[in-house]
Image: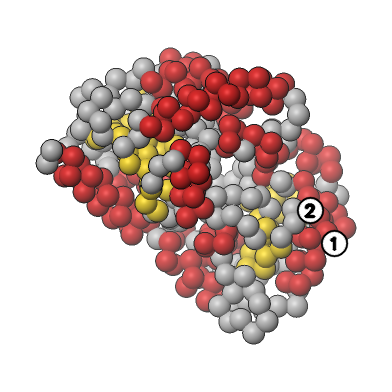
Amino acid sequence: MKLAIVHDYLCGVGGSERIFQYLCEEFNDADIYTLAYNEDATLPFFRNLKINTTWLNFFVRSMESFRWSFPIATHVMETIDFKSYDVVLSSSATVAKYIRAPKGAHICYCYIPTRALWQKNNYFKSGIKSFLISFFLRFLKKRDLAASRRVDKFIAISKFTQSKISETYSKDSIVIPCPIDLDKFYSNPIRGDYFLLVSRLENWKCVDYAIEAFNILDLPLRIIGTGIEEARLKSLAKSNIVFMGSVDDAALSAEYSKARAVIFTPFLEYGLVPLEANASGAPVICFGKGGIEETMIPWAEGASNATAVFFFEQNSQSLINAVRQFQGITFNSERLVNHASAWGIPEFKKRIRNTIDSFNSQRTQF
């Protein structure tokens, strides 16, 4: 079986880039494609690989430049030649699913139907990008639906995403959850006194209300991550909030291992950060809707297996109440680590490979 694997673009560091790394590791004889690749902006792992890009590689060097390129990028992805491949596996939240597999063998590992199109109001604040997307929204949605019809098999990262694939694309899917690298994380028996937030600093990640909450609580909060909202968010924060920028994996693991708890603010289809926190022995204080309901166990009176404290409104007061509730609860770090152990990489790779092999075997019988 000749296999190609395709990712939206490799110009940042996030959960999907880590998942794509695991796919590249498992299918190390596959050819790798992406819209654009900036080796200085994404995971070091990809520097050792031959990565095929498009002509937009010259212009798309960051997440922000990708957003501006999105309408044309969907067309560019359609021009990549996959005629010689038996199966194409796309890793997609945006444009990778637009590829054309002439032999009718396209499997899409889908993080979410394109958020900027189908959840526009949550993704954009008012501004030029929001206006432009709104102006072309009907056309872009039509193209996104057409791309989804060319996918022969969808794999969803969660039941939440599965429901969105069904609702948006009217397509069935199977669920294979995203894994975390359990070998990277460890629990420190001596915890620090700080809370930790790990996120890209973008509007839709909703970091601002966490800053508002901790300004009022006056508790130490460390924020790891960068993004276009960084300057604005820093301007909101008091001295008890420290922005650590981008850190390497070793520093990230160390911060997780000593945090009192990890704060998780967005409404997401999944979220790797809460699982990484648990794998480090840290409980989570999180917005309790979306994919988080599939990975975290909310605290309740008398519960012994809880992994998180949930709150249900995305505002500072709701988070403040959750932090105060957390301060009266004792979590068992060993149980948290054990909970996260179910999301290991080997099982993920095995299930992905079995799915592709089964799909290809069924396809070649006809």
Q: Is residue 318 above or below residue 151?
A: below
- The percent coordinates of residue 197 (x first, y second) are 67, 54
The residue beneath circle 1 is: 217
Considering depth in this image, is 97 or 167 the residue closer to the camera? 167
Which residue is depicted at the point 63% across and 76% down? 331
Q: Tell me, yes or no, if residue 56 can be seen here.
A: yes
Quarter of the figure with residue 205? top right
Q: Amino acid at mark 1?
A: Leu
Q: Is residue 227 above or below residue 135?
A: below
346 vs 205, left or right, is left
Q: Which residue is mark 2?
A: 315
Whether tag 2 and tag 1 are in contact, CB under 8 A, the answer is no
- Mark earlier in primary sequence (2, 1): 1
Name the kind of residue labelled 2 in the image.
Asn
Name the residue located 69 percent from the left edge and 26 percent from the top edge.
130
Residue situated furthest left in the rendering: 365
Image position of 202 with respect to 74: above or below: below
Callout 2: helix, strand or loop? loop
Answer with the quarter of the image where residue 20 lies: top left
Return the x and y of residue 210 as percentages of the image width and height. 76, 53
Which of the two discs, 2 and 1, sits closer to the camera?
2
Q: Residues within 10 Å of mark 2 (few under 14, many from 20)?
A: some
Q: Residue at x 44, y 67 (%)?
A: 341
Within 10 angstroms of label 1, few (less than 14), some, or many (20 or more) residues? few
Residue 6 visible in image: no
Label 1 element class: helix
Q: Residue at 63%, 42% (x, y): give it.
A: 200
